[in-house]
């Protein structure tokens, strides 16, 4: 089972200045953190895309390309590419270029995303939310499998025997994962297309996703795909520390981001009871000591048969030094504990 780390580039808000932390500083910290991930044996790094003042990264491809130049082994993925508001030709070109820079380590996680800022920013209508994604995914998969592309849709100009370069290393094919939040129709589509699946489990109890993942497995085989090639990942909020004071203190970082996002979505203020409940064995937060986090990941393997776990590790912009320590423990303590699962 592969172990990965995901980030969004969260920026803390300084009440005294009324400003978010400097995005440039944050990006440099992320690169330092990815370099350490590579050194301690983390398998995958996934960089998210947002277009808001409280996140530093709107272009994951740029950060991943910078990371490629300072790492040797770690796979570099978007987490996620908001495909509905992206141009599939450019997505392929960017990631095939990243693939060449990194000597074959690029991956794409495609999804609708849980934020909608990119739609008006790039001139797309939310009325086309579903159709945009389906159409653009169809085109991206075609580009990924064919060097000369002939394609037509409703919301984008057709392509007639056009070529897309450069081609990625593996006969032009990039690993493209489908990232979902729990919608059965999205899971069904991924299964029918034979796409690897990433399920974001960031609240409630993971066991609630059991039927959904079993549904994916059944439909994947029903569509004629080889179960031996099936890949399933979960992506959950994670932080590791061997200091209980750090674990308890991280609640304030976590609450600040949950409340900031929740304010626009009608959520009640996040509570310590939710945090502690999420950290329990049955909860969706992988926050605690290396042994606690490793035990929960092992439980996810038992529950779902996952082939990859991605710990999302920068919610609320924790301090750089404790994030580096979390990464170190994730690689040096958690990974050995789950090897062989």
Image (cartoon, rainbow, N blue to C red):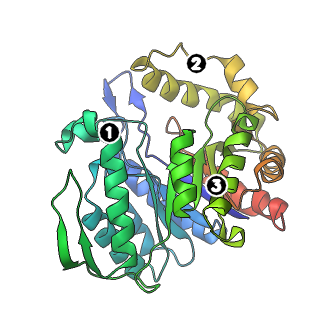
Disc 1 versus disc 3: nearer the observer: 3
Q: What percent of the width, then of the height, locates residue 191?
A: 58, 57
| Secondary-structure class at tag 2 | loop
Front residue of 256 and 51: 51
- Residue at image point 43% right, 86% down: 171
Residue 106 in sight here: yes
Whole-number angstrom distance, CA of label 2 to CA of label 3: 37 Å
Q: Secondary structure at mark 1?
A: helix
How many other residues sit within 10 Å of disc 3, few (<14), some (14-19) or many (≥20)? Answer: many
Determine which quarter of the picture holds residue 277: top right
The residue drawn where x is 57% and y is 41% is 184
Residue 241 at what x, y percent from top left? 72, 44
Q: Identify the image quadrant of residue 31.
A: bottom left
Please name the residue that numbered disc 1 is placed on: 129
In this rendering, is residue 96 above or below 300? below
Quadrant housing the C terminus:
bottom right
């Amino acid at each position: 089972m592969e172990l990965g780390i995901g980030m969004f580039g969260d920026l803390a808000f300084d009440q005294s200045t009324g400003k978010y932390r400097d995005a440039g500083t944050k990006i440099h910290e992320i690169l330092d953190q990815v370099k350490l991930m590579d050194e301690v044996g983390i398998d995958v790094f996934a960089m998210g895309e947002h277009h808001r003042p409280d996140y530093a990264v709107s272009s994951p491809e740029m950060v991943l390309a910078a990371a490629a130049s300072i790492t040797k082994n770690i796979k570099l993925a978007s987490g996620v590419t908001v495909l509905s508001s992206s141009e599939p030709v450019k997505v392929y070109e960017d990631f095939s270029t990243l693939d060449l820079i990194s000597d074959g380590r690029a991956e794409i996680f495609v999804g609708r995303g849980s934020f909608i800022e990119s739609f008006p920013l790039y001139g797309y209508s939310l009325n086309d939310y579903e159709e945009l994604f389906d159409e653009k995914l169809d085109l991206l998969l075609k580009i990924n499998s064919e060097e000369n592309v002939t394609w037509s849709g409703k919301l984008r100009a057709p392509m007639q025997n056009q070529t897309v370069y450069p081609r990625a290393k593996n006969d032009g094919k990039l690993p493209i994962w489908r990232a979902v939040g729990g919608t059965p129709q999205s899971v069904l589509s991924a299964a029918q297309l034979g796409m690897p699946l990433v399920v974001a489990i960031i609240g409630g109890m993971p066991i609630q996703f059991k039927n959904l993942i079993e549904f994916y497995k059944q439909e994947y085989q029903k569509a004629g795909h080889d179960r031996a090639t099936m890949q399933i990942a979960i992506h959950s909020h994670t932080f590791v520390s061997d200091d209980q004071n750090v674990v308890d203190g991280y609640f304030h970082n976590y609450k600040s981001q949950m409340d900031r996002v929740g304010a626009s979505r009608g959520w009640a203020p996040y509570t310590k009871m939710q945090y502690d409940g999420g950290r329990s064995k049955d909860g969706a937060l992988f926050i605690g000591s290396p042994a606690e986090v490793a035990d929960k990941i092992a439980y996810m393997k038992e529950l779902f048969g996952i082939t990859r776990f991605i710990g999302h590790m920068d919610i609320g912009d924790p301090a750089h030094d404790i994030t580096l320590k979390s990464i170190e423990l994730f690689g040096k303590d958690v990974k050995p504990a789950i090897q062989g699962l």
